[in-house]
Amino acid sequence: MVWSKIKDSVSQGENVAIFVDGPNVVRKEFNLDLDELREKTGEFGNIKVGKVFLNQYASDKLIEAIISQGFEAELGLGGEKAKESDVDVYMAVNAIESVFNDDIDTIVLVTRDTDFLPVIQKAKEYGKETVVIGMEPGFSTALKNAADHVVELE
């Protein structure tokens, strides 16, 4: 996987919260390496929160792999019955909680989904640095334009 940074990085002393839209980016066709993601996100600061949000189709093996790579595996609001839209809502609520956490300086969203645009906007309104990490096809131009920093996976 090739990483290309589109915008500048932030300082190393920041505390980072990273939220991964599992149904959108943790797919075979994208071959997302969570170890590499954690390492790359570390360039934006110290990871204090790392969550991968999943739906009802997540296998026990996937959940175990996520945990073993240092992330929390979070099932959407409906647990095993969660729909993809429920996962988006749950991830957005968690990200907004970090916006209001004074210990978090940078919000990182790993998604291609324009549904998270309001999270980016609210984070910036409250003085948080914002990073969006995503890949084509379908990487939202609106997200890329709204975030302070963009990392595109190739």
Image: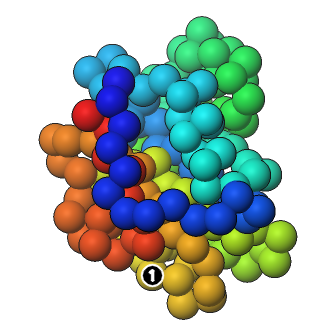
Q: Which residue is found at the position 16% from the left and 41% from the top?
A: 137
Q: Residue at 28%, 72% (x, y): give it.
A: 145
Total numbered labels placed on residues in the image: 1
Q: Residue furthest right?
A: 103
What residue do we see at 42% from left, 26% from top?
A: 32
Q: How is the image coloured?
A: rainbow
Residue 51: x %, y % from top left = 65, 43
Q: Residue at x 68, y 15 (%)?
A: 64
Tell me if residue 76 comes above or below residue 95 in the rendering: above
Residue farthest to the left, as pictured: 137
What residue occupies the far top of the structure in this picture? 61
Image coordinates for residue 55, horizontal then vertical, percent: 50, 35
Q: Is residue 126 left or right of residue 130?
A: right
Tell me the SS state at disc 1: helix
Q: Is residue 102 left or right of residue 120?
A: right
Task: Give the crowd class for mark 1: few <14, some 14-19, many >=20 residues within 10 Å.
Answer: some
Q: Is any atom of residue 115 visible in this view? A: no
Q: Position of residue 15 (x, y in %)?
A: 75, 61
Quadrant location, the C terminus: top left
Residue in the foreground of this view, choosing between 95 and 44:
44
Is 4 positioned to the left or the right of 123 in the image?
Answer: left
Q: Which residue is mark 1?
A: 121
Q: Amino acid at mark 1?
A: Gln
* Position in image of residue 34 (x %, y %): 55, 27
The answer to whether one can see residue 72 in this image is yes
Between 135 and 10, the one lying in front of the other is: 10
Name the quarter where the N terminus is drawn.
top left
Q: Nearer the viewer, residue 126 or 40?
A: 40
> Residue 94 lies in what quarter of the image?
bottom right
Single out the residue that lies furthest toward the bottom.
125
